[in-house]
Image (cartoon, rainbow, N blue to C red):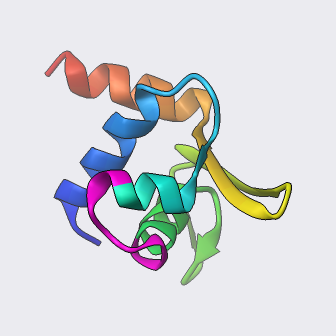
Amino acid sequence: MSDALSAALLRALAEEAEPVSIPRLGKRLGVGASVVMRALTLMGDAVLGGQAGPGWVQMRHEDGRWVVSLTEAGRQHCAQQRHR
């Protein structure tokens, strides 16, 4: 996963008050929804390869579409990044 893509995803999510559809987020960043989904999976709390992710995002299936939002941990991470 690209650090630039991860940073762009987190910045975009930090600007949103409501959950964002994954295809819309991909379109906004100029990447495919599957690329966005893979990147977000690594930023969630899923355990992959025996290691849990940081829990910065929450994805869920809502009304027939996948949406994503920042968790409180994600908001704190974004705030820390802005102060660097």
Figure check: 42 above or below 79: below
Residue 51 seen in the figure: yes
Q: How many marks?
A: 0
Q: Residue furthest right?
A: 63
The residue at the point 27 percent across, 47 percent down is: 8
Figure check: 81 above or below 23: above
The residue at the point 40 percent across, 61 percent down is: 26
The residue at the point 57 percent across, 22 percent down is: 17
Q: Nearer the viewer, residue 23 or 46?
A: 23
Quarter of the image with the C terminus in it? top left
Residue 7 appears at what percent x and percent y? 26, 46
Per the image, is 31 magenta?
yes
Q: Nearer the viewer, residue 84 or 33?
A: 33
Q: Nearer the viewer, residue 43 or 54?
A: 43
Quarter of the image with the N terminus in it? bottom left
Residue 62 appears at what percent x and percent y? 82, 54
Per the image, is 50 magenta?
no
Q: Residue furthest left?
A: 84
Figure check: 39 above or below 6: below
Q: Nearer the viewer, residue 12 or 53?
A: 12
Residue 80 appears at what percent x and percent y? 30, 22
Q: Residue furthest top?
A: 83
- Picture quadrant where residue 52 is located: bottom right
Residue 50 appears at what percent x and percent y? 59, 79
Residue 53 seen in the figure: no
The residue at the point 60 percent across, 40 percent down is: 69
Relative horizontal placement of residue 20, taking residue 5 as reference (left or right): right
Predominant SS along the magenta part: helix
- First to last magenta residue range: 28-35
